[in-house]
């Protein structure tokens, strides 16, 4: 059975997502156009659930970057616009009425950040602010039950409906860099790729332990990567971390000495750039390590200046909100202006000081579209040709909400179609071709959807295909026929085998160490070199 981490893993979670989008009062960044240009008016859409009794909806907005606020149709800061009811329908799955509302925010000048909040109220004065209940929190709660991170009878806390979320969109003409469309990206999991010349893997067989891969090891393999034909490296998180995987950063200001420190990264960047290879770093903004000094201070001191950077509450098992209830990964409250600005400053530092070429953004849906509006603007100001793309493990309608806020998102729907067709054989070639045609037309041409067959959070394709390299080749051929950038997960090109299942190794199951020399499948490697060369020639 195929496994991929996310909130749509099974039918029960898909139903939870459906419900989350219709409970209470929901906006979830539904705007049109998706990427507002200068002097374009923007239509705002809101949905209310019949049982709330909401009879009125209003929007309060600002264009000076101040925080908007209003209540019961009266603006306390900003301008108020009442929403008009456009339709009411019976929703069979919700077994209740759903009402749709709309308003239009006037056209704005270039470089304007429009911020707004939305409230709905009943005739007796009961008021709710969108999005309530928080749909992301709702589906994460259901996913945590599925992944057994919380008890199956755990009750979802919908929170206080009077707490409002500030939505935004940025009016601009920013576009993805030209080079990104032609990117052939190679994803490296640092601890598992290469130790370094003349060194051996550390003595462990457990995929949850440190194997010893370093940036110096990557540097030593740059010729191999150049000969393969790739022109972009995606490096897993490399900052100071207590874990082997790095997705819990304890210090964003320096490269972990275990990976070789800042000097090793500079050497990799210099060597890669000399070979025409760009560098994309895997940045985690949604959460960090519980060993990060800001979190330690906030945890131990209620008067800490960082206290509001996190969400502390008795409703959480460990007393604070964390990434899928993992104690070692507290979530940042990126709605806090200071926390948001600090994280963005981290990103700008590595773009400007180290001259990296962009970011793959881990669990981007956790931070949400509003945070990325600020992040994207800042990164493009700092380095206009950087490539900024997100990991949003969601269906196409959610991916599309990030248009104008990121250069693009990883194409999980296409990944699913490749696996259904070529790995587990539940789709025909006619089905995938029909899907591709519709899928391509659903997204704007300037929203980039990098394709991939494998990644570090799912079963390797080869395991699903019983290590049949011919089935893998067919999937790769279909992947390389598409116009979006392609991603190769380290080892896929040489036949790295996944030996364990999620039951045995959890999410670590696919993170086997890279094989070198005689252990590599030379015929498969030759196939990859050939198809990469053909793509470069014909693109």
Image: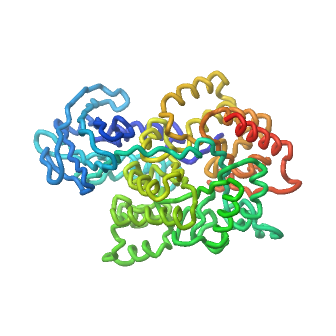
Q: Which residue occupies the extreme left position in the image?
A: 124
User: Which quadrant is home to the N terminus?
Assistant: top right
Name the residue located 12 percent from the left edge and 45 percent from the top edge: 125
Which residue is depicted at the point 84% across and 47% down? 521
Q: Residue at x 54, y 30 (%)?
A: 440
Instruction: Tally the marks.
Output: 0
**In the image, residue 489 lies at what x, y percent?**
68, 49
- Looking at the image, the residue that sits furthest to the top is 430
- Expressed as whole percent of the image width and height from the top left, the position of residue 497 reads 77, 49
Vertical position of residue 230 compared to residue 414: above or below: below
Q: Is residue 397 left or right of residue 272?
A: left
State left or right for residue 122 relative to residue 456: left
The picture places residue 401, in percent across and down from the top left corner, at 42, 41
Using the rendered image of the protein, determine whether residue 327 is visible from the camera's viewpoint: no
Compare residues 112 and 188 and report the one nearer the observer.
112
- The residue sitting at 79% across, 35% down in the picture is 470
The image quarter in which residue 109 lies:
top left
Q: Quadrant of the C terminus?
A: top right
In-front residue for pair 436/8:
436
Q: How is the image coloured?
A: rainbow
Q: Image quarter for residue 272? A: bottom right
Q: Is residue 86 left or right of residue 206?
A: left
* Residue 166 image offset from top left, x and y in percent: 29, 52
Q: Is residue 367 left or right of residue 226?
A: left
Which of the 4 image quarters holds residue 487? top right
In the displayed image of the protein, which residue is found farthest to the right? 518
- Residue 64 visible: yes
């Amino acid at each position: 059975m195929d496994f991929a981490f996310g909130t749509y893993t099974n039918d029960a979670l898909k139903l939870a997502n459906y419900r989350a989008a219709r409970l209470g009062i929901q906006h979830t960044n539904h705007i049109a156009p998706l990427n507002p240009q200068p002097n374009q008016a923007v239509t705002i859409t809101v949905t209310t659930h019949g049982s709330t009794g909401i009879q009125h909806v209003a929007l309060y907005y600002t264009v000076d970057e101040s925080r908007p606020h209003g209540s019961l149709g009266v603006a306390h800061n900003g301008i108020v616009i009442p929403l008009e009811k456009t339709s009411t329908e019976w929703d069979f799955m919700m077994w209740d009425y759903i009402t749709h509302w709309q308003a239009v925010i006037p056209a704005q000048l270039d470089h304007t950040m429009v911020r707004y909040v939305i409230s709905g109220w009943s005739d007796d004065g009961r008021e709710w602010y969108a999005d309530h209940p928080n749909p992301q929190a709702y589906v994460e709660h259901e996913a945590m039950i599925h992944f057994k991170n919380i008890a199956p009878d755990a009750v979802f806390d919908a929170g206080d409906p009077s707490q409002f979320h500030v939505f935004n969109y940025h009016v601009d003409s920013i576009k993805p860099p030209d080079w990104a469309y032609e990117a052939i990206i190679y994803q490296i999991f640092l601890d598992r790729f290469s130790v370094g010349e003349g060194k051996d893997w550390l003595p462990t067989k457990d995929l949850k332990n440190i194997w010893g891969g370093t940036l110096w090891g990557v540097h030593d393999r740059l010729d191999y990567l150049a000969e393969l034909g790739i022109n972009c490296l995606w490096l897993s998180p490399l900052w100071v971390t207590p874990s082997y995987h790095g997705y819990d950063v304890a210090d964003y200001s320096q490269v972990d000495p275990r990976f070789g420190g800042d000097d090793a990264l500079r050497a990799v960047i210099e060597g890669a750039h000399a070979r025409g290879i760009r560098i994309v770093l895997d940045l985690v903004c949604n959460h960090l390590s519980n060993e990060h000094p800001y979190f330690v201070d906030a945890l131990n001191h209620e008067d800490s200046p960082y206290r509001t950077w996190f969400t502390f509450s008795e409703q959480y098992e460990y007393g604070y909100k964390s990434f899928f209830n993992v104690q070692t990964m507290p979530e940042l409250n990126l709605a806090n202006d200071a926390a948001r600005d600090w994280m963005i400053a981290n990103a700008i530092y590595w773009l400007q000081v180290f001259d990296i070429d962009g970011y793959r953004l881990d669990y981007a849906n956790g931070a949400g579209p509003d945070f990325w509006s600020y992040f994207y603007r800042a990164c493009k100001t700092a380095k206009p040709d950087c490539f900024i793309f997100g990991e949003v493990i969601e269906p196409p309608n959610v991916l599309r909400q990030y248009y104008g806020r990121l250069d693009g998102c990883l194409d999980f729907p296409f990944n699913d179609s490749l696996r259904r067709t070529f790995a587990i054989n539940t789709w025909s070639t006619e089905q995938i071709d029909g899907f591709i045609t519709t899928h391509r037309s659903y997204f704007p041409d300037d929203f980039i959807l990098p394709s991939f067959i494998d990644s570090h959070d799912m079963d390797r394709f080869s395991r699903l295909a019983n290590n049949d390299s011919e089935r893998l080749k067919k999937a790769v051929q279909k992947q390389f026929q598409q116009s979006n950038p392609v991603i190769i997960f380290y080892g896929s090109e040489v036949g790295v085998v996944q030996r364990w299942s999620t039951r045995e190794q959890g999410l670590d199951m696919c993170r086997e160490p890279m094989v070198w020399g005689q252990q590599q499948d030379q015929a498969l490697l030759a196939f990859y070199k050939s198809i990469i060369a053909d793509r470069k020639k014909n693109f």
